[in-house]
Image (cartoon, coloured by chain):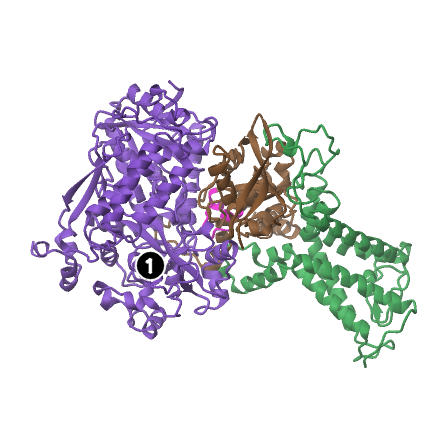
Chain colours: A green, B brown, C purple
Amino acid sequence: MATGTESPRQRGGVHTGTRAAITAPHLRTDRWWLAPACTAAGLLAFVVYSTWRAFANADYYAAPYVSPFYSPCLAENCHAMRAGPNADLFGGWWGISPAIIILVFPLGFRLTCYYYRKAYYRAFWASPPACAVAEPHRSYTGESRFPLILQNVHRYFFYAALLVAGVLTYDTVLAFRDQHYRWGHMGLGTLVFLANIVLIWAYTLSCHSCRHIVGGKLKHFSKHPLRYRAWQFVGALNARHMQLAWASLLSVALADLYVYLVASGVFDDPRFF
Amino acid sequence: MSGYEARFKVWRGDAGGGGLEDFTVEVNDGEVVLDIVHRLQATQAPDLAVRWNCKAGKCGSCSAEINGRPRLMCMTRMSVFDRAETITITPLRAFPVIRDLVTDVGFNYDKAREVPAFVPPDGLGPGEYRMFQEDVNRSQEFRKCIECFLCQDTCHVVRDHEENKRAFAGPRFLMRVAELDMHPLDAAAGAGLDRGRAAQDEHGLGYCNITKCCTEVCPEGIKITDNALIPLKERAVDRKYDPLVWLGSKIRRRSGA
Amino acid sequence: MAAVERQQWDVVVVGAGGAGLRAAIEARERGARTAVICKSLFGKAHTVMAEGGIAAAMANANENDTWQVHFRDTMRGGKFLNQWRMAELHAREAPERVWELETWGALFDRTADGRISQRNFGGHEYPRLAHVGDRTGLELIRTLQQKIVALQQEDHRATGDYESRLKVFQECTVTRVLKDGERVSGVFGYERETGRFLVLQAPSVILATGGIGKSFKVTSNSWEYTGDGHALALLAGAPLVNMEFVQFHPTGMVWPPSVKGILVTESVRGDGGVLRNSEGKRFMFDYVPDVFKDKYAESEEEADRWYADPDHNRRPPELLPRDEVARAINAEVKAGRGSPHGGVFLDVSTRMPAEVVRRRLPSMYHQFKELADVDITAEPMEVGPTCHYVMGGVAVDSDTAAARGVPGLYAAGEVAGGMHGSNRLGGNSLSDLLVFGRRAGRYAAEYAHGLADRRPPVDEAQVDTAAAEALRPFTAGAADESAAGAGGSVGAGGEAGPPENPYTLHQELQQTMNDLVGIIRREGEMEQALRGLAELRVRARRAGVEGHRQFNPGWHLALDLRNMLLVSECVARAALERTESRGGHTREDHPAMDRAWRNVNLLCSLADPTGGLAAADPARAQIRLARERTEPIRPDLLALFEKEELVKYLAEEELYE
C-alpha cells in the first residue's frame, strides 16, 4: 500500500505546489486522534488475548461448553467433547493448538470485513489517520493491486463464516445440557453462549457481502419482493455493522474467557436449572 | 443572546503563495460561518474571494475547511464554536487554489465527463417509462448529491496523493457509476458497457480503502461508502472474484456450447 | 484597451439554470455550435433551490387532468394577465418536457403503478407536480447537466474534443449584448477567475439569467439574481413587460436573521401543513377572495377531508395562489397576531407522524434543524413572505421566445415575461423553463442557421466601451474621465466625490426596495423609492473596489449594481403606474382589481434610445414606460371558462368581442 514516511521537505499531498500554501499538514483542532487510538487499543487487546488463548491449547472445554475459539475442533489432539464439534479432519500430524486451524476463517472474515478494514487502515496504517489529516505515506495504491487487492476475497470468508456460525449455533444448543450431558438445563454459560451466538449471527448477516448477495445485486427489487425484504432486513443490520463488529468481538472473547475460567477451575458454572 | 466579537484566521493568497490572516469580526445570534465571511467582505476585505450561491445548503458552492474540517460555510453555525475559540477558514486543500477561499475544482468536472451517461432503453419512448419506487430509491439517494465536492476534497486518495488524480474518479463519481448501475432502466449492459467492471478498471474503485471520510463529510448525509462504494466493490467481485459466480458462468458456457 | 479573448459560436446562452441548459441542449441537438455562460459553477444555478415540483398535466394522479385544466389554473393564478398563448403552449407541452427528462436519466418519485407521482400545490386543481421529495430543482438541473455532459461525450467520440460543439463557460458574467445595427452580434463578459474579458461572437443570444430578487432585502434568491438578463435586454433595446409583478412567496424563514427569506417549500402546505396565527387560528379561511370563493373549503373539517377525498371536498385555503397567502400573512402580522419573530406559524408536526414528515419533506426538516434549531416534526415553523420570483421580464414572442425589436435576442425562463401574468403558480416555473427553454434553443438555432455566413460583425467600439465600463470601478473617485464613457450620456461632474463601497450601496438598495416597493405598495413610498434609486444610481457610478481583477467579489458586485438599479427602477415605475391590485402587485391605495387594467401591459424601455445610462442626473429617469393593450384571448381558450367566472376578470367590451 505505501512506503516511506513523511519528511519535512516532502512536497506531496496537501503540500503540492498548486494548492493553498499552508504549512500545517492539517488544521483540525478537535481530538481527531481519539477514535483511531481507541480502535487501536481495542484491536490490540483482542489480538493479545486471542493469541494467548489460541496457542494455549488448554482449558477450552468445560462440559457442556466449548470455547468458540476451538470450535469446530478439527485435529486428533482435540479434547473429546461428547456429541460436541469434534471432526478429526487433520489427523495426528497436527501438533500445535487446533484452534489455529479454525480461527483462520473468522479471522479472515474479520480481517477482510469492510468495517475492520476501515478501522485498521485508520488506526494502524494511518491511511488516513482521520479525515482531512494528512497521511504519512509517500505513495498509495489502496486496494488496487497486490496484496490488498486480496481484500476482494471477503465473500469467500463470508461463506466460511456462515459455516462457522452454524457450528457455534450447534455449540449453543449443546449448552442446554448440564455437565453430565443431560438435556434441558441452563447455566450462566448458556446465557453467555446465547448472547454470543446472537451477536455472531447479527454481525455475520450484517456483512456488506451478505447484503449484496441477498438482494443488493439486483437491479429490480420490484420483481423479487422476498429478496427485497431480506435486503431491507440485512440493510437495517448493516447500518449497525460497526457496533455489531465490536460487540461480537467482545462477546466471543467473553465466551472463551468464561469457558477458560470454568475449565481452569476458577469458579463453577452457576446452574439455573 | 447578543452579538460578540469572534477571532478568525482566514487563508488569503493565490497560487503564488499566501497565508492565514487574522480578523476580528462581529457575530450575531443565529449566524453561520458564511455570514461572517460576508461581513468581512462588506467591512474589512472587499476583495476576499469566496464562492457561494444559495446559502441554504442546496447548491454546494461554499465548500471550505473550517478548523481543518471540510464543511459548507452556509451550514456551519457559529453556535457550534466556543466564543473564545479562533476559527480558521481555509480553501479546500485537495484542489489547486485560485484565490483566497476559491479553488479550482475542474478535476471534478473532468471526472464527470469520464463516466458514460445514462443509456436509455430501446423501445421505450418518453412517457412510457415505468419504474417502481423501491427500484429508484437507491439511485435517488445518490442523486441528492449537491456536488459540493467535500467528499472529493477529504478523500485521502487524491488529497494526499496528487498523482492519483489521473486514475481515481473520487467518491462523487464512483457514486455516479453506482447510481447508473442501480438505475432500473439503464441499458448500458445491453450496449456492451459493464459499469461494475468499469468502476474498477477505469474509475479506480480499487484505490478506495473504504475509510469512510466521504460519508463523514457529506452534508446531505448520503451513505456514500455503505450504499454506493461497497456495493460497487461487491459488483466488481461478482464480475471478477466470486467463485460461485465464476463456476456458474463456466458451467453455463459449457452447457451452451 | 484591455486584452480580450474572442471566440465564434452559433448560439450563446447566457445563464445555466433550467432554461439555459434546456435551450443549450436544444440548440446543440439542432446542429448549432452552442456556448453556455454560467455565472457560477456548472450545476449550481438557482434552479436547484426549486423544491416543490414541475407542473405538467400528465394525469398520473388524477385522470381528469388535461392541458386545458392546467391552462385554466395558470390563467386564474395570473389573474388573466398572462400572455395566453404562452400559457397555452406551456400547458400543452409540459408533459412531454417532463417525460423527456426521464429519457435523460431523471428519477422522479413514483406512483404505485410505476408512473411519475404528482403532488398537490397551490392553485392547481389536481395533483400535478412531478417531484423528487422536496429537491425537484436539483433533479432538474442535474439531469440537464448530465444531458449536456452526454452530448459532450458524443462530440468527444466524433471529434476528439468534448467542447467542440457545446461548451460551458463557468464563472463568467456577461455585461453587454453586442449589436450590429438592430441585430445581435455577440456578448461581452468577463471571467471571474482571471478577470479577463471575453467576446463571444454569435448571431443568436439567449438570455436565461433568472430573476431580480437580490434587489430586495428579504429574498429566497441567491446572489446571482441581480437581474442581469433584464438589464442586458434593456440595454440592447428590448423592452421589459409587467415588471411591477414581483411574487412574494408566502413562506420564507423568518428566524434567525441571517437566514431570513430562505424558502420554505409550498409542498409543506400541499402535503397537509396548515397556517395558524398566534391565537392558534387557521386564519386563511378569512382570506378567500370572491373570485375563488366556490373553489375553497369553508370549514376546517371540509379542508381536512379534501386530502383523502379531493373529488367530494373543496381544497383548504392554505392552497390559495401565493399572492393571496402572502397578503394574508402580512395582514395577520400587521394586526398583531404574528409569531414571536414576525411571521406566522406553519405546522406539520400535529398533522403528520414525525416519520412521514422526515420522508416527505427531508430537506425542510434538515434546513430547520441545521439553520434554526427547530425540529419541524415536533414544533411549528415560523414563516413570512419573502421575495421569490419576478413575473415580469423581457417581452417575448410567445412561440419563438424572441425578444421584441432585437433580431437574434431570445429570452426564456424567469427573465422572460408574460407567461405567468400577474402571479405565478407554484410548479409552473420549472415547466416554464423546460417548455420555453427548448423553444428558445430551437428558434435561436434556426435563426443562426438561417443567417449562414452572413453573421453580424462585432463592432470594436462597442467592445472598447464595454471594457471601459467594466473597468470603471477600479478608477472610481479618480478624476480620470477616460475611464468613464459607457454609453453616450455621462453627465459632467457626475464622477466627483469619494469612492463608494459597493456592499453598502447594495444594502441600501435592498432596504429601499424592501421597504418602499415591497409586498404592499403606496404611491408616496414608491415616489420616495424612485428618488432613492436615482441617488443610489449617481453614487453607484463611484462604486470603487480594492485589489485586482482576479476573482474579486467587490468588483463583481459593483458591476451587478448597474443591473439591479435598472431593474429596480423598472419595478418601481411600473408599480407606481398600475393603479390597481392584481396578483403580485398590491396597492394599498388601490386595493381592488380593476377590470380596465386586465388587458393593459406596461412596457419598460431605456429612456435613452442609444443605450446610454442617464446616470449622472438624478432628475432624469433611466426608464420610460409605455402602456400597451394585450392581444384578445383566443375564443376557444376563453370558452374553457364559465361565463360567471370571466365576468369577474374581463372588461365588458372584452366579453362581447
Q: Residue furthest bottom?
A: A273
Q: Name the element at disc 1.
A: helix
For the question of whether residue A90 can be seen, the reply is no
Q: Chain of mark 1?
A: C
- Percent of width and height locating residue C635: 12, 54
C196 or B77: nearer the viewer: B77
Which residue is pictured at 34% across the width and 42% down the height? C210
Task: Tell me if residue C311 comes above or below residue C133 in the rendering.
Answer: below
Task: Tell me if residue B179 comes above or below residue C233 in the rendering.
Answer: below
A28 or A182: nearer the viewer: A28
Q: Which class describes the residues within 10 Å of circle 1: few (<14), some (14-19), or many (20+)?
A: many
Q: Quadrant of the N terminus of chain C?
A: top left
- Percent of width and height locating residue C511: 36, 45
- Asked if the magenta segment contains residue B29, the reply would be no
Position of C237 with respect to B15 (left or right) is left
- Percent of width and height locating residue C448: 27, 30
Q: Amino acid at mark 1?
A: Asn
Q: Which residues are magenta?
A: B178-191
For the question of whether residue C383 can be seen, the reply is yes
Q: Which residue is mark 1?
A: C330
Which residue is pictured at 28% across the width and 37% down the height? C534
C86 or A111: nearer the viewer: C86
Please tell me in which quadrant of the rendered image residue C41 appears: top left
Q: Residue furthest top?
A: C1
